[in-house]
Image: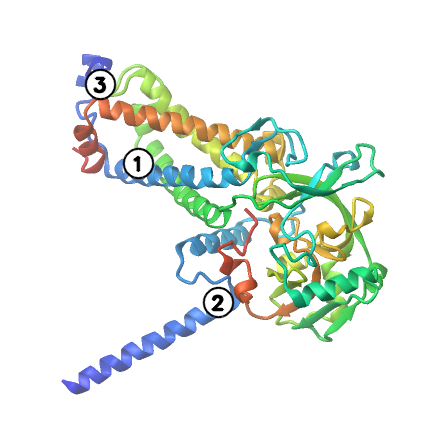
């Protein structure tokens, strides 16, 4: 009797540990669900889009005359203590860089790259550039058409050397938010790190000196005020600063 | 449904009008549950920006077709630093919003799309069964005869086969990933904001249908209709 009990316990333990491995395996390559039914829906949408939709389709690009008025929302100045993304340490750095016209600012690229690197704004402007006029769709419901000029994220990643285990790119920002995209979006030709907007330097409110544009997802994935990129081989929810733990879908293609 | 609206001859033709097949009952309740969830979460999504527009773009800095004064969000005040992009002929502007708005879109959007998945799967099954079993033609298609009146048939057909599929397409026309794959959706609806506006009017029409449908059920025998749609007799 006692032997059977031990066997059953051993089986249960075995099942539990294999479940743990399966769960860990899931969270490594996919956005986690935390057992939350809403996150399961997000997971389904992400996988369905990746499975069913053409992977390299381009977001529609517009004409100069289509450029519209555009609000700036969320953090519009990381140095302003009244704003949602204010972190004192970042705010001080940001204010200093702003004061010096971002001459000393660097984009740090690390993680699953051959050579962890940093790039000045001038370095990025010397790389190949792409200008696109696209529609920014905010989760709130509004939209605006703007022109963006920047360096394809792919070019920056290639300059640092993409390792074969690279799966996600995380964006760390001066407004303390962290969020990421998968390699499919990271290598997409319209995914650029923009330093220009509507023919001008990127205004502060829109993410100076550098922001990402992820044109096939909602506006909140196009993070502003970039500090650095971390290429990861596993999914990272970025803890309390990540969108997913704040109740937002990690995938915002819908 | 109502005895007065059913000619006797047709009642004899289809002697079991209230006996809903199991697949009708299951899909009816799945669709009812998902449509109510879609309406509820959709309303919360609308509350973040209760302004409607026509065309591709629309935001607080452009004129609205319709402002819904549901909360302060329909006309946010407190804007900072207006920038004008003079290099362009139409001189577009930008400004920073400093007001904290009401926004519950995190859970509302995820719930909306989860309910959307349930709706699309249940709706597709309903449509497939409906065509194969000829339920659509026998009981729903607008014609005289059968267990439902012409008015009922018109209402059921237009909601199930026109309005609800239209809502799915208008919703997909707002998805940046979907319109990158099928830009024709933007052309069909006249742009992202037009699709959003039409999605809202579709919601209003669905709410009107649900109110009418539930009222008819109440007036013509709640117990009988619920029994028919739950246990099938």
Residue A247 against residue B30 in the figure, above or below: below
Q: Is residue A61 visible?
A: no
Identify the element where label 3 is drawn: loop
- Mark 2 near mark 1, Cβ–Cβ under 8 Å? no
Q: Residue A62, percent across and down?
A: 73, 38
Instruction: Determine which of the numbered discs, if any, sits on residue B28 in the image.
Output: 1
Residue B212 against residue A107 in the figure, above or below: above
Residue at the image position 49 percent from the left and 41 percent from the top: B45
Identify the element where label 2 is drawn: helix
Q: Is residue B168 left or right of residue B74?
A: left
Q: Nearer the viewer, mark 2 or mark 1?
A: 2
Q: Residue A64, percent across and down?
A: 79, 37
Identify the element where label 1 is drawn: helix
Q: Residue A166, percent across and down?
A: 63, 69
Q: CA distance from mark 2 to mark 3?
A: 55 Å
Q: CA distance from mark 3 to mark 1?
A: 20 Å
Residue A169 against residue A145 in the figure, above or below: below
Q: Which residue is mark 3?
A: B2
Q: Residues within 10 Å of mark 2 (few under 14, many from 20)?
A: some
Residue extending farthest to the left is A1
Q: Quadrant of residue A86?
A: bottom right
Q: Chain of mark 1?
A: B
Residue at the image position 41 percent from the left and 44 percent from the top: B115
Q: Which residue is mark 2?
A: A27
- Mark 3 near mark 1, Cβ–Cβ under 8 Å? no
């Amino acid at each position: 009797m006692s032997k059977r009990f031990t066997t059953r316990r051993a089986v249960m333990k075995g099942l539990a540990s294999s479940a743990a491995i399966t769960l860990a395996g899931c969270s490594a390559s996919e956005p986690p669900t935390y057992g939350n039914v809403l996150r399961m829906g997000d997971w389904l949408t992400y996988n369905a889009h990746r499975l069913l939709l053409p992977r390299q389709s381009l977001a529609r690009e517009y004409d100069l005359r289509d450029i519209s008025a555009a609000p700036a929302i969320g953090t519009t100045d990381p140095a302003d203590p009244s704003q949602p993304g204010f972190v004192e340490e970042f705010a001080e750095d940001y204010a200093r860089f702003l004061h010096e016209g971002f001459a000393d600012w660097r984009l740090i690229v690390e993680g699953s790259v051959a050579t962890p690197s940093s790039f000045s704004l001038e370095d990025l402007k010397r790389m190949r550039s792409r200008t696109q006029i696209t529609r920014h769709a905010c989760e709130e419901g509004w939209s605006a058409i703007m022109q963006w000029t920047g360096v394809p994220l792919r070019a920056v990643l290639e300059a640092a050397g993409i390792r074969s285990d690279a799966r996600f790119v995380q964006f760390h920002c001066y407004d303390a938010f962290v969020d990421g995209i998968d390699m499919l979006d990271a290598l997409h030709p319209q995914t650029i790190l923009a330093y220009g907007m509507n023919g001008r330097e990127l205004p502060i409110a829109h993410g100076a000196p550098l922001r990402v544009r992820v044109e096939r997802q909602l506006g909140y994935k196009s993070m502003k005020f970039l500090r650095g990129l971390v290429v990861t081989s596993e999914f990272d929810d970025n803890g309390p600063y990540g969108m997913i733990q704040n109740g937002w879908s990690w995938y915002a293609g819908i | 449904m109502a005895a007065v609206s059913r000619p006797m001859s047709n009642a004899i033709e289809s002697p079991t009008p209230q006996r809903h097949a199991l697949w009708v009952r299951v899909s009816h309740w799945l669709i009812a549950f998902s449509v109510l969830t879609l309406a509820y979460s959709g309303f919360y999504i609308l509350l973040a920006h209760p302004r409607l527009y026509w065309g591709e773009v629309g935001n607080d800095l452009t004129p609205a077709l319709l402002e819904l004064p549901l909360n302060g969000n329909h006309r946010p005040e407190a804007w900072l630093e207006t920038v004008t992009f003079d290099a362009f002929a139409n001189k577009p502007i930008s400004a920073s919003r400093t007001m904290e708005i009401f926004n519950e879109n995190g859970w509302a959007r995820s719930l909306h799309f989860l309910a959307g998945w349930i709706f699309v799967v249940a709706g597709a099954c309903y449509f497939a069964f409906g065509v194969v079993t000829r339920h659509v033609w026998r009981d729903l298609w607008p014609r005289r005869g059968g267990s439902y009146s012409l008015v009922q048939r018109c209402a059921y057909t237009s909601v199930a086969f026109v309005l609800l599929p239209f809502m799915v397409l208008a919703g997909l026309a707002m998805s940046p990933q979907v319109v990158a794959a099928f830009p024709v959706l933007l052309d069909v609806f006249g742009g992202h904001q037009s699709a959003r506006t039409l999605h809202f009017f579709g919601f209003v029409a669905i709410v009107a249908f649900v109110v009418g449908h539930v009222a008819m059920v109440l007036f013509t025998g709640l117990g009988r209709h619920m029994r028919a749609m739950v246990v099938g007799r």
